[in-house]
Image: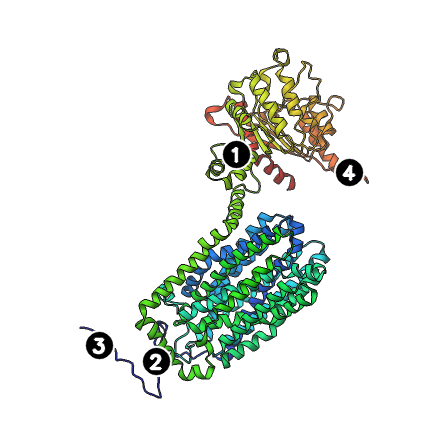
Amino acid sequence: MGSPEKPLATATVDEPSQVISPAEEQHPANDENGKRPPPLLAKLAAVFLISCISFGSAWSSGVTGAMKSTIKKQMHISNTQFSLLEASEDFMVTLLMLGNGIVTDRVGGAEMIVYGNIVYTIGSILVAAATTVRSFNFMVGGRIILALGDIATQVAQYKMFSSWFSPSNGFASTLGLELAMRKIGGFVGKSTANPIAKNTGNFAWVYWTSVFMNLFTNGATVFFWMFNRYCNRHYEGRQDKATREVLTEKNKKFEIKKVFQLPWMFWSILGFSMFQTSAAMVFSQNATELAEKRFNVDAIKAGWYSSLSQYAGFFLVPCLGVFIDVLGNRATILFICGTGMLLCMTLVNFASSKAGTGAAFGIYAIASALGPTTIIDGIRTSLWHQSVFGSAYAIKVTMNNAMNIIIRIITGALQDADNDSYHRAVRVYLFLAASSMLCDELGLLQWTRKRRLTYGPEIIDNMRQHSLVTHERRSWWISVCCFSALILLLTRGYTAVYKMMLPSELILNVVESLIPPNPPVAYPRSHSITQTLLSLSLVSKLTSKTAKELLYKHCLYIDSEHCILSLMQQQNGNIHPSGIFLAPFSEGDLNQPEVVNRINQLSYRAFESLTKLVINMPLRSLYPEEDENQLRPVLRAAFSRLTNLEEFCSVQDELYLGTVEDDSEPAVWSFWPRLRRLALYNADVTDPQLFQGLRRCPSIRDLVLVRADGLIETVSDEEVDLDAYLQLKAMTIVNTKEFYRMMQKDDLRMSFCKTLESRSENHGRVESADVASVGPSLRIRTVCVDKPEDRKDEDIAVCQEWLLQQAMSGELWHEHEAYVSS
């Protein structure tokens, strides 16, 4: 049997027709579930908690603009790079905000606020760390992480307001209170930024203070989440009294169709916001530095001036919200706001004196206070469906940030081209303010509270029917055209106007981020990072230079004769590697003049920057008496040239580069004054070359000896300078299991190992006023290399392979550091 038809809704003069929304169908009436509407106290508590969250986030958001001069000086960046720093956050918002709005409508604002603030705090910690180490690229990355959290919270806050209050019934008032708290937070953060930097002597503390403030924000967020869950369990029935639409925090499905039913009035408001908000945002970014130049004051005073200009109107915002709720006149307020911005930017352009700039700052303080509340309330009032307010607000933020990217980069480039002056940049502000006046056609938003509650159902229902039924096709085409214009602004307009400057910077940052913080000595050709950099060096001119620099710096893995020959043929100038793996000799033969000459050339071109070197060379395959081509003196001179080395490992020997038979020459590595880490294979601990080299190179702190000779021999102070070893911080002895078993069987009380161990313990217990002359006690570690069952007789090969693997990955020294710090 078919279900009975639903009765048609009827209306009388005294009872206007009820507008049924999908949200109403999803929520039963109050008398059916026993829940009552939330009391005023609960609504005020929600407003207070969200305002606390806004206060904390606004504190952090104003810091970077106030620190512009300091950041440029301390980070050694240009105006264009600073604009990139600001625009990187806008870029992420532009990419993700629209999708975030749709998701927020679906899952609800409370959950998104929690997740967003956690990510925001992580981003603020990364930004603070970046300022501590003075890394611009790191700071850009931190700002991107921070933007991900900001994206989640921006829409969620206002979505929560729309689910608690309707237009002309508290929505604008709560917006005003929240925005006032946001202005106070921004004022405090911006005005205290430079004093904190000056008093602490390090501007990084400004960002660490923001981290602490974000922790407060997280606490308020968690408390609000718990409060919202309580209200959802105990209260229901929040409605728009004018339309009787149920106000929803989240929907049961994604409302994509309703997003494409946004009215023309909504797009008109966005046209005004695109120019007015962009003018305000870019002017706010540069206000502190502009005040420094126009008023000729230091950064602290300029920060106070710019803060007053941006936040002095905070007391107007709550009053404005109440005014809009009661008397409406939103279009009139937007006209006054646009006129004030135009007058302000006119003064900035044509009255560059102190008086003219001061007047401009004062007018800006009033005009900028009128915009946000009126724009957001106007967007909410213009919608047919409250359930997609999150998506509508996300479209507004996406459009504003896309515009901000273009304007910020343009003004930064104009300032750089104008010798750091604002003569050209302020013309852009004037253009934006004038353009906002052309978009002020919003007469239908003049409703007062009384008119909306009295005639709202009839008027709104007629307008909705007119837009969505009578002229459905026309409304659909309007939405399609407006969305197309928005997409054009996000993509073609941005890239065409400014030749992809921002994406270029971001792409190069991504290329540089391929290298981790602690890379190995050198990546082999087969490694994914090397392959990626090779591709990037060929794909475009943009990435080619940076990719090649990174290849020479981190990927010089020279494991064949062909590799070193082609490297020297392709690269004529100096290269700047940080690490090199060198194993160019084939078939274990050192007698290859061409390869030796190439190594000599490489040492000339790379010695300035080379700090890490691992060699796997058969230096004992050609002894001095057999060296007819005099290759060993060339190699000795080449390695002696590497005076900036800090970490060295020789896989096959102790770096045997003697040129005479009696081994009377000092070890080559002893001529490297910055050497801190040394790993040698088959060195003799009783050889004067070793302990005299340690004396000659006191910077060495970590020594690794693999299959060393002389460890179990009886030694005395006359034969071996044990004190040379005691100046080390740590020494690692590496051998096979058979060697350590032999040490346990024999009486080795007077051997090198036991004597050095005993001397080290006594050395650490010495109490002396001259602690520096005693030094730290030597830590001795033993490592046993396991041999596979099928390689029991291959001690040499197994130990050399172990040393090569550990040295190339860096684990050899990481384990050393962990041992020493324990």
Viewer-nearest residue: 386 or 728: 386
Point out which mark residue 523 bears: 1
Query: Residue 288, located in which quarter of the rendered image?
Result: bottom right
64 displayed left or right of 798:
right
Marks 4 and 2 close (CB-CB < 8 Å): no
Viewer-nearest residue: 554 or 361: 361
> Depth-wise, is mark 4 or mark 2 nearer the camera?
2
Mark 4 lies on a secondary structure that is helix
Residue 284, percent from left and from top = 60, 62
Point out which mark residue 4 bears: 3
> Depth-wise, is mark 3 or mark 4 nearer the camera?
3
Q: Identify the residue shown where x is 57% and y is 40%.
A: 518
Residue 745, percent from left and from top = 61, 25
Residue 10, percent from left and from top = 29, 83
The residues tagged by marks 3 and 2 sit, at their Cα atoms, a distance apart of 21 Å
Specify few, some or many for label 3: CA neighbours under 10 Å numbering under 14, 14-19, or 20 or more.
few
Q: Amino acid at mark 3?
A: Pro
The residues tagged by marks 3 and 4 sit, at their Cα atoms, a distance apart of 97 Å
The residues tagged by marks 1 and 3 sit, at their Cα atoms, a distance apart of 74 Å
Specify few, some or many for label 2: CA neighbours under 10 Å numbering under 14, 14-19, or 20 or more.
some
Q: Residue furthest left?
A: 1
Q: Amino acid at mark 1?
A: Tyr
Please, is residue 459 above or below residue 72 in the view?
A: below
Point out which mark residue 772 bears: 4
Mark 2 lies on a secondary structure that is loop
